[in-house]
Image (cartoon, helix red, strand yellow):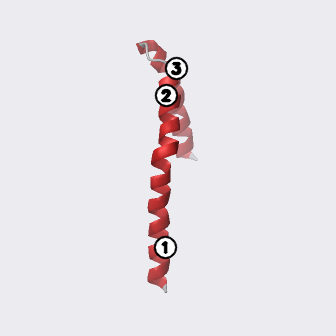
């Protein structure tokens, strides 16, 4: 729960702070979309493989 709150606070700071340095907030949303499309599946695959390996070790 603590990490979720920290993540939300960081996103709010970025959302409010980026216009101060003349960076469009659209870039932030594009980055989040890109991460969810390309990075999160690889992380999920990594943990799935680790889970399968640990189950195989138990057997």
Element marked by disc 1: helix
Residue at image coords 44%, 61%: 46
Check the image and name the residue furthest to the bottom.
Answer: 59
Report the front residue among 31 and 11: 31
Report the front residue among 16 and 35: 35
Whole-angstrom CA distance, mark 1 to mark 2, is 35 Å
Whole-angstrom CA distance, mark 3 to mark 2, is 11 Å
Label pair 3/2, CB-CB below 8 angstroms: no
Residue 28 x/y as whole percent: 49, 28
Residue 1 x/y as whole percent: 58, 47
What number is the disc on residue 16? 3
Neighbour tally class for label 3: few under 14, some 14-19, many 20 plus, Cα within 10 Å? few
What number is the disc on residue 52? 1
Label pair 1/2, CB-CB below 8 angstroms: no
Mark 3 or mark 2, earlier in chain: 3
Residue at image coords 51%, 21%: 25
Residue at image coords 51%, 44%: 37
Q: What residue sits right under mark 2 in the picture?
A: 28
Element marked by disc 2: helix
Element marked by disc 3: helix
């Amino acid at each position: 729960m603590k990490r979720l709150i920290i993540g939300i606070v960081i996103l709010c700071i970025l959302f409010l702070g980026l216009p101060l340095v003349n960076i469009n907030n659209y870039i932030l949303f594009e980055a989040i979309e890109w991460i969810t499309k390309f990075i999160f599946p690889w992380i999920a695959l990594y943990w799935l493989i680790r889970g399968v390996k640990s189950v195989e070790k138990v057997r």
